[in-house]
């Protein structure tokens, strides 16, 4: 596991975009797992710049998003700014900035008539695409990945998830208050990739910023593996793992100096 600490959000985002760009250059038809939320916006903006100014080519890339609210979907009759779906978020924050083909972008369908059957179909589509080469992840305030709330099985597959009060509060402030939606009206369930689905990715890129996440960063990376902090499952992944943090997010890590030393030595010896 490579734990990389950068001074601030901008540097973190730049480094994360470089990791994703390197994956695309190494395998132009790679499969990316993508995340929503405030954390990856800077990364997506940098990827858009790389596409526009440096020719980073998304034309063969396939993407699968982690999650979507149940009962929510992008409504073609509404302006994107009026639509609180994660499909809308991805269009505005990344897909409209790069040359990706719309038919190669997959976001869970929150309006699926049979959500359980859709979850099975989503798993099948990931498998048909050859599996996820690089999965981008953020970190919830209680240490969750996607919408895998505390207590979710670490072997779980794509499923329907009831959201905790903390997640509802966090997402209401981030997405719904500005749209004039009440707390009762916002979705209380979601479709999410499971922890087992995430761990099947060949490599993982976890990005976290801000002092508010410092304690759950430490619990995820240095604490015990537990379903109460679902992101702690990162310790079980057998493949390539990159964790990129800004200084505030890394502030509770007991071994931060060691992680910095390891990065310096790897750079020195070209590892």
Image (spheres, rainbow, N blue to C red):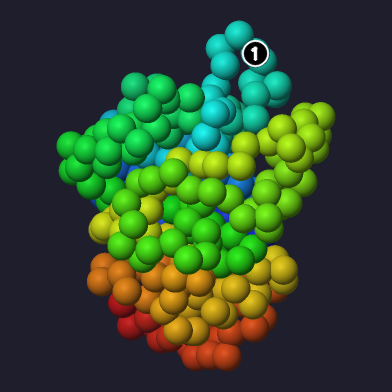
Q: Quadrant of the C terminus?
A: bottom left
Number of marks present in the image shown: 1
Using the rendered image of the protein, determine whether residue 72 is visible from the camera's viewpoint: yes
From the viewer's perspective, tell me whether residue 202 is left or right of residue 79.
left
Among the 4 quarters of the image, the one containing residue 61: top left
Q: Where's the N terminus, which quadrant?
A: bottom left
Quadrant of the rendered image containing residue 71? top right
Residue at 27 percent of width and 38 percent of height: 120
| Residue 263 visible from this viewpoint | no
Q: Is residue 251 left or right of residue 180?
A: left
> Residue 211: where, in percent of width, then height?
72, 71
Residue beneath disc 1: 78
| Left/right of residue 30 with respect to residue 49 in the rendered view | left
Question: Can you give x and y, in whole percent of width and height, for residue 136 in the image?
Answer: 44, 53
Between residues 134 and 178, which one lies in front from this camera angle? Answer: 178
Q: Residue at x 70, y 21 (%)?
A: 82
Identify the residue shown where x is 48% and y is 78%. 221
């Amino acid at each position: 596991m490579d734990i990389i600490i950068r001074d601030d959000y901008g540097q973190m985002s730049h480094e994360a975009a470089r990791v994703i760009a390197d994956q695309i250059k190494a395998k132009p038809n790679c499969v990316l797992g993508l995340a929503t939320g405030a954390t990856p916006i800077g990364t997506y903006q940098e990827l858009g710049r790389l596409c526009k100014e440096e020719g980073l080519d998304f034309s063969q890339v396939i993407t699968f998003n982690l999650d979507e609210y149940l009962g929510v979907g992008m409504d073609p009759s509404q302006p994107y700014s009026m639509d609180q779906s994660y499909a809308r978020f991805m269009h505005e924050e990344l897909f409209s900035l790069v040359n990706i083909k719309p038919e190669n972008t997959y976001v869970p369908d929150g309006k699926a008539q049979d959500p359980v059957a859709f979850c099975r179909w989503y798993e099948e589509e990931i498998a048909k695409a050859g599996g996820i080469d690089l999965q981008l992840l953020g970190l919830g305030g209680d240490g969750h990945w996607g919408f895998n709330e505390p207590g979710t099985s670490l072997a779980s597959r794509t499923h329907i998830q009831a959201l905790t009060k903390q997640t509802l509060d966090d997402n209401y402030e981030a997405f719904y208050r500005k749209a004039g939606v009440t707390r009762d009206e916002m979705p209380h369930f979601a479709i999410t990739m499971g922890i087992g689905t995430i761990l099947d990715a060949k490599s993982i890129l976890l990005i976290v910023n801000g002092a508010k996440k410092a304690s759950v960063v430490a619990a995820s990376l240095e604490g015990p593996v537990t379903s109460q902090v679902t992101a702690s499952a990162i310790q079980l992944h057998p493949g390539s793992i990159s964790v990129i943090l800004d200084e505030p997010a890394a502030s509770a890590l007991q071994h931060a100096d060691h992680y910095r030393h390891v990065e310096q030595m790897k750079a020195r010896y070209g590892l």
